[in-house]
Image: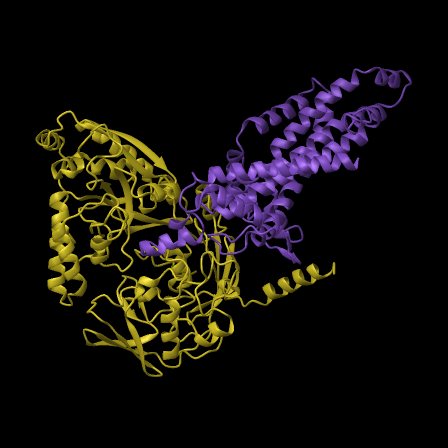
Amino acid sequence: MLAFAIRRLLEAAIVMLTVALLAFVLFRFVGDPVNQMVGQDTSLEDRMRLREELGLNDAVIVQFARFVAGAASFDFGISYQMKQPVTAIIAERAPATIELALVAALFAVSLGIPMGVYTGIHRDSWLSRVFLAVSLIGISLPTFLIGIFLIYVFAVKLGVLPSFGRGEVVRFGFWRTGLLTASGLKALILPAITLGLFQMTLVTRLVRAEMLEVLRTDYIKFARARGLSKRAINFGHALKNTLVPVITVIGLQLGAVIAFAIITETVFQWPGMGLMFIQAVQNADIPVMAAYLMLVAFLFVLINFLVDLLYVRVDPRIRIYGRGA
Amino acid sequence: MTFRPLAVVSALVLALAATPAAAKTFRYAFQGDLNALDPYTLNESFTLGALGNVMEGLTKRDKDLKIIPALAERWEVIDPLKWRFYLRKGVKFQGGEDFTADDVIFSLDRMRSPGSQIKTRAPADMKAVKVDDYTVDFVLTSPNPILHAEWDTWYMFSKKWAEANGATQAQAAQASSLNPFALKANGTGPFMIVSHEPGVKTVFKVNPNWWGKPEHNLTDVIFQTIKSDATRVAALLSGDIDMMDPVPVQDIERVKSNANVTVLTGAELRTIFLNLDSMRDELLYSNVKGKNPFKDARVRKAVYQAIDMEAIHSKVMRGMSTNSALLISPLLYARAGEFKRWPYDIAAAKKLMGEAGYPNGFEVTLDCPNDRYVNDEGICQAVAQMLSRIDIKVKLNAMPKAKFFQKAGPTDKYDSSFNLLGWTPGSFDSWNVIANIIGCRDADGKGGTFNFGGYCNQKIEELGRNILVETDTTKRDAMIAEAFKINHEEAGVLPLHQQALAWGVSKKVEIVQRADNQILFYWVKMQ
């Protein structure tokens, strides 16, 4: 087990380095950050000096080496735009994204599973058709359209929910939460639905497919023959056995939700990491972009690692002890 | 520990309940961020405007941009090389410090510190001499009629406060750590900062000890960034905010049709123009080899006359622009009315192309930013279409601003044959335009750094040098007119239009829209 973990960690390091290198090659094409940092009247000499001081005139490989050296000690430099250490900005912005992602995932699961079970059991009922139609919308409509639509209906027309932002927040150390205030909770509703809709759809369809599969198996037939109640069969036996793949997918999707909340955050001006990243791209704020990409890469590496470990626990047939063992 | 948030919440509730009934909170949003609160680190009109509610300069500008006294009660030009400023007495900073001549001299040093982005606010060789606690002389080495033109945004720091907070130097862009003051502010202005989260939210409250007479009726102000156009519009329509800037051109009618809000429009100072590479001997991005058609004034004029500005005004800008014959807003130059655009005339343009030896036109690439000016890419698309009528085949290369300024600007040595740029003279004065936009430069950008086409006329250079030191307004304006006339005749840099401001404002709010697009809430009245 330990050997496995070490090997995976080495692999993870290689993945992270590759991501960093790719990012730095790409940064050559994002443009010149200096023009966004100085006023229009700043002299050419000052501009050129700033480029030199920021190390933008160095070869890509030198910039990359400097970045890796810093990153190894969690120093990602200072944001060109916000003039704050990047690690501090991320620590400031991460809670907003994580709360949004968790609530979105909770929304997706708590609605997706019952809908999946229902559509799996009552395949042809009209309600099933409605659920499936809704899930089709969730899959096919782009996120920003759903977001704008929700804002239009609930903020502009009905005026019941805020159109943007995070509401009032309460601070616990570095963590600022919007979950403890009324305005914070209200502000969370629309973005969470927007972000979670796709995941909900995914969960619904996955649970439905798994349910249909399981309900055809022999042990369900035997359970029915034994005269167990429908409830016991559907939830006690069938649903339980569909959950293994569902949990895996949800775990992986949670990473995706955190990493790709960018659009939802932009539409709702949600002060999280996605919004920070978009702003960084527009201003060619290289330290922020680099740190964010590293964080996302790390998140995926971590989740994959945990999922691999989970598999072993869930399914002993998977061997991980290496070829020699 | 777990009870603390509850305590905070109840404290908040109590605080809210305790606010007097007259509390008036003005909530506004802008597409960009308010980052560091040090006004010397970013020379950008939104940031300077927001901080202009908290900090003040020796001068300020009124609703029509006229220079009026602020922290200086008055000033006089003792001789062309010596300006004397008399400071207002009894002014206190929000931290309680008195404002004196020492603060002015300190602020001058600070403005010249390495990290400062506003070094051009005063000539580098200007000296400040303290006469007494409330009188300062500024001693120059050459006459400068517009010395104090930008002093409205050169905000005064308290020497004592800056020294206590380690803020004696402007935050350097590449510093390895953040100065703690970059998120604090201490000014003399009508409002003070309560809290500041860069890129998210900034809360202001009224400064009860301000020296002036308030022209607003606010108690609190909340600023928030809303980047997405659609969300900004929705936030205004739903009443979550009272004012926002800008309203996207395509949403203006929709916003106006709402009963509770309106759109405030007006001319902005920024002029949009086209640069043609008239410097290189061979165009970089063209099929013409061995020569450069844009070196020929006839070709440049043909391009000028082939662009139908009326169509751009009505179709691309939907009426939200003012076509311009000059590279400066008519609000900023007294004799602007004397200039008329060359008429849109395809036949004349074709004739000019024939005379210049390009009856069959040529190919060229137009570089264009797509996130910098109002509908910048749309303007470029229209220009490309229009030029095809005189057989100039334009390949459009639109890109984000960060990329555009790198490619078309000095960083990549003006790697562009044809591009679109906008400019607002920081000093609100024509000399700035003559020096930066039509002043000669070398291949690296020494000289007129923002002359992206490299257009050069020695006569304009000479006029520029004289304009800089001429103190007689009539003579000065005449020389400015001459310089602009040369650019007009030679079609050196082609002016297009001034874009318009569009603010979305709740009908509860009375606000002054100044042409420099600063949002100054010390003039806001709310019902």
Q: Residue furthest right?
A: A226
Q: Color of chain B here?
A: yellow
Viewport quadrant of the N terminus of chain A: top right
Please tell me whether residue B189 is drawn above or below residue B291 in the rendered image: below
x, y percent for residue A66: 53, 48
Which residue does the image show at 38% across and 78% down from the upper left? B102
Pinpoint residue B70: horizontal percent, then vertical percent.
Answer: 33, 72
> Is residue A269 something that shows in the picture?
no
Viewer-side residue, B110 vs A205: B110
The front one of B448 and B397 is B448
Query: Image quarter for residue A226?
Result: top right
Residue B462 in view: yes
Q: Quadrant of residue A14?
A: top right
Q: Nearer the viewer, residue A277 or B26?
A: A277
Residue plotted at (43% across, 79% down):
B98
Q: Position of residue A173 (x, y in %)?
A: 66, 58
* Chain shown in purple: A
